[in-house]
Amino acid sequence: MAASAIVLRHLAAALLVLLPLAVFAGSTQSFTLAAGSHPGSRDRIYKVYVPDGLSGPAPMLMALHGCQQTHDDVLRDWGLVAAADRHGFVLVAPFITSYDGLRNTNCWGFWFDVHRREGSGEVEDLHRIAVRVESDFAIDPARRYITGLSSGGAMAVVAAVAHNEYWAAAASASGLPFGESAASVSLSGRCPGSASFRPVPQIAAAMRAELDDTYPIPLMVLQNDRDCTVVQPAGRNLRDAHLAVFGDAGHDTATEALAAQRACSPVFQVDHGCEHRIYTGDGTAASRSIVETVFFSGPLNTPDPSDTDHGHYWIGGEHGRDGRWAIRRGPSYPDIAWDFFVRHPRDGTGPGAPPPPGAPRISLIGPDPLELELGEEFVDPGATATDAEDGELPVTADCSSVDTGSTGRYSCVYRATDSDGNTSTATRAVVVLPSRPTGPLCTIETASPLAHILAGRAVVGARFGLRALARDDGVDIGFAWDTWSRVRLYEGEPGRWYGREPQGCRT
């Protein structure tokens, strides 16, 4: 029985390879960067997703896959494509393509000295890819961001240190501190995992030796406390080393620099006890962050049969997908990380950045971005402004560019001025989307569980990979290799399939 279960699990993994990539509203292009002349350079494949309706220089987010993943996993499962559509940024997904040294499949070489030094190896190739994207697309130089999972998260940290003169901010998901060795990853195959970490002062010294710019690059650390592959001391060490390097003498520890803590938001279905903590240069919430942490106690098991069930994954949120080392339920990494990024442009003056000292603080009411359908009436939700001396202040809004008669991305600009003449501005994005098609409220497909899996409407999951689960709400629809039963699935939104009839499908 155990042997047959193992066979079925591997067959399930093979079936998942047949599932098609999702189709998105924008455009995805594939490129190859030829190897450079620097040591350790190789040809690198990368893909660029550009949302429809971008105008003017846009932010850029580079997202690095983890071990045993590819750039296609990033685009399909992580929810970043939908985030790019909502927030209006260019998404860059490099593929390691080939590599040297002893390592797991498709791991970025964060522990090799040649790959973590400016002008050398993989970190320099990633910088070259970003520069190439800037030459091909209109990118805002103040809003260049990088993130990644596992070895990709560790490499995002490497990039933030080796090229802190270039990147505006970084986010590491289940990543590791700069200068760590391969021993920092638990390879025992058991839970809880075990690993060896370098002391924080040693990490901080390695960072200082590599830095060539004084810019205190903000870092977000996302970490599952129950992760058995990259175990939790990694997240705390990332936080503490970054504070030691970039905090001032009175605010270079977690206790001194803590400015705020709150529940994580947004989350999809469950928060896993997630807590979001903000650490700033002076310990006040009004200042730019040095580090922000998102720590939670997530599940070990995941729906994908090829996963290791070690609590090691990216959480894509509502618009993500249960895939290889990726799940949907929990704190929504795309939205939490993007909120962090938008608050930390490199020049400190972009949307969401703290106001200058003494200037009013503007808070938007309602969603940002605000999404409307073509032809839908636009009503400005408004904003509020406060000032330390004047209290509440009036806010003026300029939404004259918004045209709901044409699809595209528009903006409302809010201004407030205090009694000393200090003026602050804030911007809300307004996205006008095509009207939803009329006719049947939902597409309904009736087929066997196996047929649903092969068509991409369901995935293999549950214990031993024996069950078929509706792709987007996880409803168990039967035995995965059942070809005789007839099960109904609902397409609640384009490309999203549910076992329970969504409310919007009901007349």
Image (spheres, grey):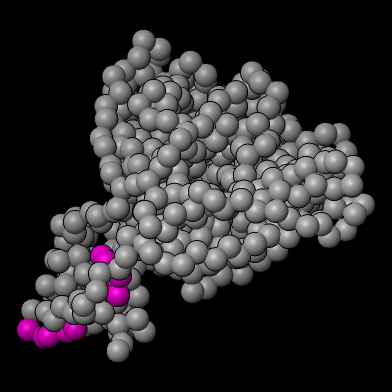
Query: Split into 4 quadrants, where in the image is the C terminus?
Result: bottom left
Residue drawn where x is 85% and y is 41% of the image: 421
* 68 horizontally vs 421: left or right: left
* 188 horizontally vs 278: left or right: left
Query: Split into 4 quadrants, where in the image is the N terminus?
Result: bottom left
Above or below 357: residue 44: above
User: At which x and y percent is residue 353?
Assistant: 68, 43
Q: Which of these two is toward me, 393 or 243?
A: 393
Above or below 2: residue 342: above
Q: Which residues are magenta?
A: 484-496
User: At which x and y percent is residue 404?
Assistant: 42, 58
Residue drawn where x is 11% and y is 72% of the image: 451
Spot the residue most to the right: 389
The count of marks equals 0
User: At which x and y percent is residue 365?
Assistant: 65, 64
Q: Which of these two is toward me, 73 or 199?
A: 73
Residue drawn where x is 45% and y is 43% of the image: 89
* 129 horizontally vs 429: left or right: left
Spot the residue most to the left: 484
- The reply to whether the magenta stretch includes residue 491 is yes
User: At which x and y percent is residue 316?
Assistant: 43, 59
- The reply to whether the magenta stretch includes residue 164 is no
Please indicate, yes or no, whether residue 68 appears anywhere in the rendered image: no
Q: Which of these two is toward me, 296 or 28?
A: 28
Above or below 268: residue 221: above
Magenta span dominant secondary structure = strand
Spot the residue most to the top: 37
Residue drawn where x is 31% and y is 27% of the image: 44
Please indicate, yes or no, whether residue 124 appears anywhere in the rendered image: yes
Q: Specify the quadrant of the image occupied by residue 470.
A: bottom left
* 74 horizontally vs 175: left or right: left
